[in-house]
Image (cartoon, rainbow, N blue to C red):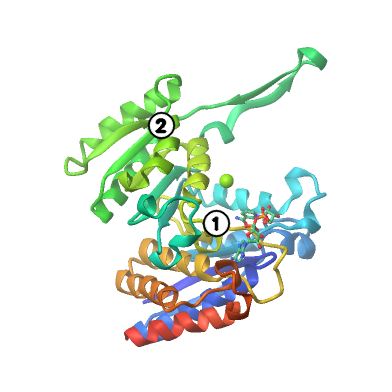
């Protein structure tokens, strides 16, 4: 198969981890006779420096013409003093909106070899394998009006939490679809005891559930979900929730593993290209040193292979290669206390490629 992939390396360690990804994708292309064509484009700080805007029209057009988008990370101290609407992050938000990426997926997988990194006890995290499906383009972060009213002691600030039936239905449907693909269950998280938008959410979940009679599903209040994620995360398979709850719960869930450099994400639209990126940022403290952990980005490639290209054999092979490398004891600096044994980004990437080609 031939696939066009837009690569947006971005800032900081972004280019370093994206290089790992293109190297691995090229290898997978050779192994499975696919043609992966990469088109590089600027996003974030690097785009601001070159063209004065975090999301150049050219970048948007490259993304829209691609089958999938891979992003490194954007931002860094260099651009921190710019006003909010001109900052690197604005480029990413704009891209999400333009590509209508309403479904954000964050899997949380425990690697036995890294169980030590978790702040939670071994017996709690063993076997955790869940994914949070967060609504990404609606709710409190986008609702209007959002404004200040009045002055001084009388001043008010307003944000609006609004969801349409349509917006809820499409994300909930994704949740059920993923539960079906994974052969698992669905937990819908809301605050229906307080919020009207959550009561509508619950109604829609119960309606959509009629189309998935084989999927076991339940409702959970968000405060309880926050507690259950650390008390007994194994009970979850697919969690579907609205934007703000998903923002908070997915950061909480990511800490179950304890290693930021390991976690991937995908943001999907209805039929356009999806965006795949590590959840970590541009890590300015280690940028340019060649020591960044590439595995979060390589796991994002696993998600791209799965969700954008439906190449499940290829995805499984890469996921297994990542696991094999960790089982064999290979670590980048963020995963070990023994600095003398730490692999560089390139060495880690080559280990993954070795493990991958051994499977063929
Ligand atoms: P960060 O994720 O960049 O770094 C936090 C800590 O984790 C740092 O010590 C860093 O060295 C380490 N780390 C992160 N990824 C790593 C990797 N792959 N390998 C090894 N170590 C890794 O978060 P921080 O410091 O809060 O933000 C730095 C910049 O990144 C900011 O400008 C922020 O706005 C931006 N950012 C961008 C995101 C994106 O593009 N999606 C997401 C989060 C932050
Ligand atoms: Mg967040």
Q: Confirm if mark 1 falls within 8 A of ligand 1.
A: yes
x, y percent for residue 176: 29, 45
Residue 17: percent from left, percent from top: 58, 71
Q: In this view, does 145 lie to the left or right of 139?
A: right
10 Å crowding of disc 2: few (<14), some (14-19), many (20+): few
SS at mark 2?
A: helix
Q: Is residue 104 left or right of residue 210?
A: right
The residue positioned 40% from the left and 86% from the top of the image is 30
The answer to whether 300 is drawn above or below residue 177 in the figure is below
Q: Which residue is drawn at 63% across and 62% down?
A: 59
Which dot, 2 or 1, sits closer to the camera? 2
Query: Which residue corresponds to mark 1?
Result: 279
Outermost residue on the left side: it is: 214
Find residue 326 and report its image quarter. Answer: bottom left
The spot of residue 114 in percent (x, y) is: 45, 65
Give the position of the N terminus as an image quadrant.
bottom left
In front here: 132 or 91? 132
Report which residue position mark 2 lands on.
Answer: 224
- Which tag, 2 or 1, sits closer to the chain's start? 2
Name the residue at 58% across, 58% down.
280
């Amino acid at each position: 198969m031939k696939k066009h992939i837009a690569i947006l390396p971005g800032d900081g360690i972004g280019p370093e981890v994206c290089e790992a990804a293109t190297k691995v994708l090229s290898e997978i292309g050779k192994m499975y006779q696919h043609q992966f064509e990469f088109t590089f484009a600027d996003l974030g700080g690097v785009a601001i420096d070159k063209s004065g805007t975090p999301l150049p029209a050219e970048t948007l057009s490259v993304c829209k013409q691609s089958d999938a988008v891979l992003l490194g990370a954007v931002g860094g101290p260099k651009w921190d003093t710019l006003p909010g609407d001109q900052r690197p992050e604005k480029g990413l938000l704009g891209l999400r909106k333009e590509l209508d990426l309403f479904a954000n997926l964050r899997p949380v997988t425990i690697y036995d070899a890294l169980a030590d990194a978790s702040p939670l006890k071994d017996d709690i995290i063993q076997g955790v394998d869940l994914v949070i499906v967060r609504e990404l383009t609606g709710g409190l972060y986008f609702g209007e009006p959002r404004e200040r009213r009045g002055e001084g002691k009388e001043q008010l600030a307003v944000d609006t939490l609004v969801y349409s039936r349509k917006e809820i239905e499409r994300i909930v449907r994704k949740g059920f679809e993923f539960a079906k693909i994974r052969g698992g269950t669905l937990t819908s998280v809301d605050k229906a005891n307080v919020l009207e938008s959550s009561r509508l959410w619950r109604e829609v979940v119960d309606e959509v559930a009629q189309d998935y009679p084989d999927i076991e599903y339940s409702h959970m209040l968000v405060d309880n979900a926050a507690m259950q994620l650390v008390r007994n995360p194994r009970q979850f398979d697919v969690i579907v929730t609205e934007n703000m709850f998903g923002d908070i719960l997915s950061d909480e869930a990511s800490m179950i593993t304890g290693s930021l450099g390991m976690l991937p994400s995908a943001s999907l639209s209805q039929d356009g290209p999806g965006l795949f990126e590590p959840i970590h940022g541009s890590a300015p403290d280690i940028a340019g040193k060649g020591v960044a952990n590439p595995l979060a980005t390589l796991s994002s490639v696993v998600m791209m292979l799965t969700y954008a290209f439906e190449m499940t054999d290829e995805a499984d092979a890469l996921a297994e290669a990542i696991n094999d490398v960790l089982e064999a004891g290979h670590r980048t600096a963020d995963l070990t206390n023994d600095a003398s044994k730490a692999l560089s980004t390139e060495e880690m990437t080559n280990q993954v490629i070795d493990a991958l080609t051994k499977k063929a």
